[in-house]
Image (spheres, coloured by chain):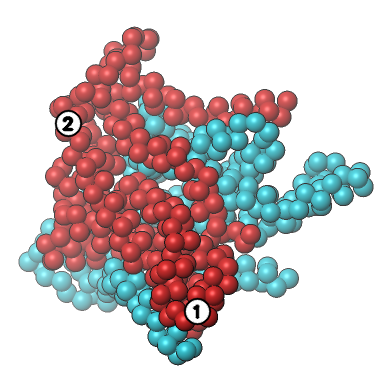
Chain colours: A cyan, B red
Amino acid sequence: MSRSDARLAWLLVAPAMSLIALVAVAPLAASMWESLHLHDLRLPWLGRPFVGLAHYRAAVADARLHEALVHTAFFTAASVALELAFGMALALILHHLVRGRALARVVVLLPWALPAVVAALVWRFMFEGEWLSHPRGAWVPIVLGDVWKSTPFVALLLLAGLQAIDPALHEAAALDGAGPWRRFRSITLPLLRPVIAVALVFRMLDAFRVFDFVYLLTGGGPGTATEVISLYAFSTLFQELRFGYGAALSTVTFAIVFLLSLGWVRALRTGEDA
Amino acid sequence: MRQFGATIILAAWALPLCWMLAASVAPEAALFEGGIGPPTLAHYRAIFAERHFWRPVANSLVVAGTTAALAILIGTPTAYAVARLRLPGARWILAGVLAVSVFPQIAIVPTLFLLLRTAGLLDTYPGLVLPYLTFSLPLAVWLLAAFFRRVPRGLEEAALMDGATPLRAALLVVLPVAAPAIATTAILVFLYAWNEFLFALSFTLGPERQTAPVAIALLRGRYQVPWGQVLAAAVVASLPVAAVVLAVQRRIVSGLTAGAVKG
């Protein structure tokens, strides 16, 4: 019985697992293999010679890559910090809202559910002109647009966390004379910690691979002042047609996200044990 | 007082969308020189009559619809097995699925492009649906597994006691209960596929197979961005999303948070 159970389970799992292996895992490995070759689609007569780690040696010395990594890290830190702060505020508002909950939920959900292209273009329309041609100013609509679009996700996660907190805890603390701020710090925040951690991880990993917003708002400009890592890899691939080096850049992106995730998994584990 | 503060913040959140709607019906002159004119549907007429915007919309419907159908068809059995059958390593399968869904899309763009080119699938529907499975399958498996875990065990046990095979118990007893969750998952997958940009931009070559987001992003005027048309197209691409959000907002929220918050 249990053996046929396991056989049925494997049978049910097999199609999805093989498809994911085929369309996601295999191309990932192939990208790494491609990054070890010189492959320039503009120069087909060169063929596709193996060059070992040459692209990675070039990447270490590539100033444009360093800049793109700094930009990506800045964007991730700024947008995720703002999203957590605004997300907490929105979640508290929605949690305590007496009337108009359904309407509020729609208002909050819409920016999150809309295509990123739409969100990015709306913000570009609102900031067209001076802002976008300024190397630092151009970050303002990029970050604000992302905050506008992604805060709802954070807020809804936190709201679900808030709703899982037993109201009796707050009532007891209020009877003992704790004010709203004190109750927030001593009851709400500690109990929300796991949810905050999940929201933080998901948003960070998502922000680090940002592409649409920057592509549509500034195209990485002025110059390369707002170029992020995904955009640099994309233009190496599809504008310069240097597939070998482009694959190396995307592998670098993957490696960083992978290490970040490992770090987070470890941090969350030790957090759970404590 | 609190209600007032909430209203202000929610109004601020709605402002960009109102701005988009207003600009999409503003006459061309009002957009560039300021001032207000009578609302007009000229931009909407222009994107359909001159820009053939119905084509990318149809492409998006086909691609997102097929992606959602395939993800549900292939993902539901997996989610069921992971959540409810005694499967050694189920945790690892879920962890792997989650890992695939967070890794950066750009990491597989170079080889997918070369593979699709070799297979002659660039600029075709399968050439978009296959890459879309990389994020839609993990999403479907993750959401559905979270749901299947909450279905009471007693359901199948009763069916098994009555002599049903595990497969019959799953199909006849659990599946009907899961129908609403499957519908919600299908909707979420459809939205993700409808909104996707990087793959669609990389794996289409011209207007024939472009999806709506790509077509909007590439709308160009002769001298300047035709903002009226761009925003009208943006409104059109947002309509299905808005309709879905209005219709099933409550379920989207519970589906979205199910995987992340232990209730």
Q: Both on one chain, marks 1 and 2?
A: yes
Query: Residue sitting at 44 percent across and 52 percent down?
Result: B184
Residue A220 position in % (x across, y down): 35, 43
Q: Residue furthest left?
A: A45
Instruction: Report the residue marked by disc 1.
Output: B162
The disc labelled 1 sits on which kind of residue?
Answer: Asp
Host chain of mark 1 = B
Query: Residue sitting at 81 percent across and 41 percent down?
Result: A180
Q: Secondary structure at mark 2?
A: loop
Residue A74 visible:
no
Please tell me in which quadrant of the rendered image residue B105 appears: bottom left
Quarter of the figure that contains the C terminus of chain A: bottom right
Host chain of mark 2 = B
Q: Earlier in the sequence, mark 1 or mark 2?
A: 2
Q: Residue furthest front?
A: B162
Query: Residue sitting at 38 percent across and 66 percent down?
Result: B75
Name the foreground residue: A137 vs B145. Answer: B145
Q: Is A88 left or right of A114, judged from the image as shown? A: right
Name the foreground residue: B131 vs A256. Answer: B131
Residue B182 visible:
yes
Instruction: Report the residue marked by disc 2.
Output: B51
Residue A159 position in % (x across, y down): 63, 47
Q: Is B222 left or right of B259, judged from the image as shown? A: left
Q: State the separation of the CA atoms marked 1 and 2.
A: 61 Å
Residue B255 position in % (x across, y down): 50, 54
Q: Secondary structure at mark 1?
A: loop
Query: Residue sitting at 33 percent across and 55 percent down?
Result: B68
Q: Nearer the viewer, mark 1 or mark 2?
A: 1
Please tell me in which quadrant of the rendered image residue B47 appears: top left
Residue A82 position in % (x across, y down): 58, 43
Q: Is B254 left or right of A71, judged from the image as shown? A: right
